[in-house]
Amino acid sequence: MKANFHNITLDDKKIFDKYEATTRQYYGGEYSFPFIFIYALDKMQICDLGDTAFIKTMWSGNRVYFPPLLKDASKLPQAIQFIEQQSQLEGVPLDIRGFTKDQTDTLDPRKYSSTINRGLSDYVYNAYDLINLSGKNFHSKRNFITRFYKAYDYTFRVYDESTDRAAIFNLLKKWDVNTRHEKWEIEETLITRAIDYYRELDLKIAVLYVGTELVAFSINSVRNAEIAYTLFEKADTDYIGSYQVINQRTAQMFFTNVKYVNRECDMNVDGLRKAKLSYNPIMIIDKYRVQHNN
């Protein structure tokens, strides 16, 4: 049976809501509707069979499936069999991205192989740590914040589309010139999509100004009382401490009622990895790629 997939739309949030009771134990972005919708563009599709939903996309020219959404986690082997059948119907090899170690451990190693791309591992932090920056591990962060507060006349507030949209894209242009990396063009497209749909996705956007110049912004999503996501965060490093300020003030504004914050992956960018590790994650969620053994 070939499943009836359709392009992901805003209406598909109800599918994610239906499976939330069993997927809330997974903190990866693959289980967050705003994350999926922002990354969907025109390539991602979903199919809901009632007790299992499947998501597939194109990734670097390959047909890729995300982990299925299940009402009963014990049905994962059957869901993988279904993905295998769909892959065979499309004439493509089995390729599933985003499995956790626990999910991978349920697979038969004689049939499946699994590999990790460290650049796609999610960094998860204790929200309390990001809010308070207490203790010696965060001493340097507090110093940067103090320097910023002493040096600049700043304003921190919630995003206002009428005044801040253009300012965000002006900052992105400057950030592009100064810190461009190979994933930048894709990221710029994703940030644009997030801003375009921030109301529909209930995204929490914060902005930081020095005088009349926007120097940082942060785009976030609160999934439930357990986990929130910082989807994008950008700052002008000409303003010393701008990253540290937008990070802490965002946590203080949006994350007081959640336990953990997923600040996404580092895309194998060395500077980004160093920055994410410097905030002392309480866990790093490795993402496994599952394929058939050769």
Image (spheres, rainbow, N blue to C red):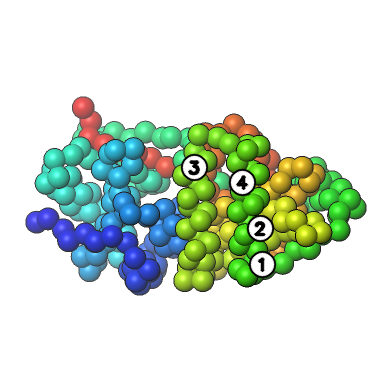
Mark toward the start of the polypeptide (4 vs 2)? 2
Give the answer, above or below, for where 84 lies relative to 3. Answer: above
The percent coordinates of residue 256 (x first, y second) are: 66, 67
- Residue at image point 38% right, 40% down: 288
Mark number for residue 167? Answer: 2
Mark number for residue 173? Answer: 4
The one of 220 and 77 positioned closer to us in this rendering: 220
Identify the residue position indicated by label 3 in the image: 185
Give the answer, above or below, for where 204 lies relative to 139. Answer: below
* Residue 193, visible in the rendered structure: yes
Image-quadrant location for residue 13? bottom left
Horizontal side of 258 relative to 238 (left or right) equals left
Q: Secondary structure at mark 2?
A: helix
What is the CA distance from the residue labelled 4 to the residue labelled 2? Answer: 10 Å
The one of 136 and 16 positioned closer to us in this rendering: 16
Q: Are marks 2 and 1 in contact (CB under 8 Å)?
A: yes
